[in-house]
Image: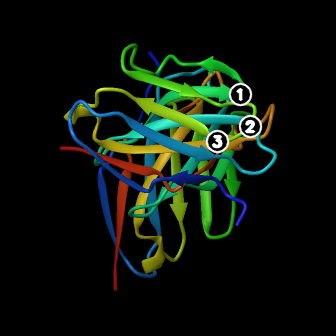
Amino acid sequence: GESVGLHLPTLSVQEGDNSIINCAYSNSASDYFIWYKQESGKGPQFIIDIRSNMDKRQGQRVTVLLNKTVKHLSLQIAATQPGDSAVYFCAEISTTDKLIFGTGTRLQVFP
Amino acid sequence: NAGVMQNPRHLVRRRGQEARLRCSPVKGHSHVYWYRQLPEEGLKFMVYLQKENIIDESGMPKERFSAEFPKEGPSILRIQQVVRGDSAAYFCASSPAGSSYEQYFGPGTRLTVT
């Protein structure tokens, strides 16, 4: 079946360092991926997306990399700030238009 | 603020009672999605609706759960005869027609069954 999963449940980084959050997916037919940020008590917030015809996409302080060969996604956050502390989810759009989420990685930023 | 609105934000029900969760989509959005999130887990798809039509309910339990999105008014997720295992956060998302990748999420309803 389809599944999206993450390697690390918790990531602790020092303020100012770069963060890398990883995600593996199993459906090689997926053509659209999204990273969401979820702060405590709130709904998921869109960060960045990428289509399967791309390897890399950059936003403000964030970069998503897609490796279709090994079915792997990563989210890179540059100069991590305390406000980046949250749970991060990768998700894919299924062929039936629903989002399939991974289990999440908690990012903790220390001063 | 024209974002997705959900109410109530917190809902406490005793076992056997009914829970009704409401979702008002972004103005102009005709598609609504419901997801359930257990503590420390990702969101799990439940149901996808358009106005007056259920598109995909493959994630919805077959019993006690129902959803609607009427022509007028909010989308409703209804859970009858709640059990403790129904305790979770329920999120609604909405998208414009033909743009399921543009799902905007509401703040969620946290259901606690005692």
Say what amino acid the circle numbered 2 marks.
Glu
Location of mark 1 (residue)? B50
Crowd rating for badge 1 (residues with CA inside 10 Å; few <14, some 14–19, many 20+): many
In this picture, residue B87 sits left or right of residue A46: left
Crowd rating for badge 3 (residues with CA inside 10 Å; few <14, some 14–19, many 20+): some
The dot on residue B72 is 2
Say what amino acid the circle numbered 3 marks.
Pro
Mark 2 or 1: in front is 2
Q: Position of residue B16 (x, y in %)?
A: 24, 30
Q: Tell me where residue B18 sits by quadrant.
A: top left
Please, is residue B73 above or below residue A76 in the view? Answer: above
Q: Single out the residue that lies furthest toward the front.
A: B17
Q: Single out the residue that lies furthest toward the bottom.
A: A111
Mark 1 or 3: in front is 3
Location of mark 3 (residue)? B74
Give me the chain letter of mark 1. Answer: B
Quote the CA–CA distance across marks 1 and 3.
12 Å
Quote the CA–CA distance across marks 2 and 1.
12 Å
Q: Position of residue B58 (x, y in %)?
A: 50, 16
Say what amino acid the circle numbered 1 marks.
Gln
User: Does mark 1 fall on the same chain as mark 2?
Assistant: yes
Whether residue A55 is visible to the viewer of this picture, yes or no, is no
Q: Position of residue B87 (x, y in %)?
A: 28, 41
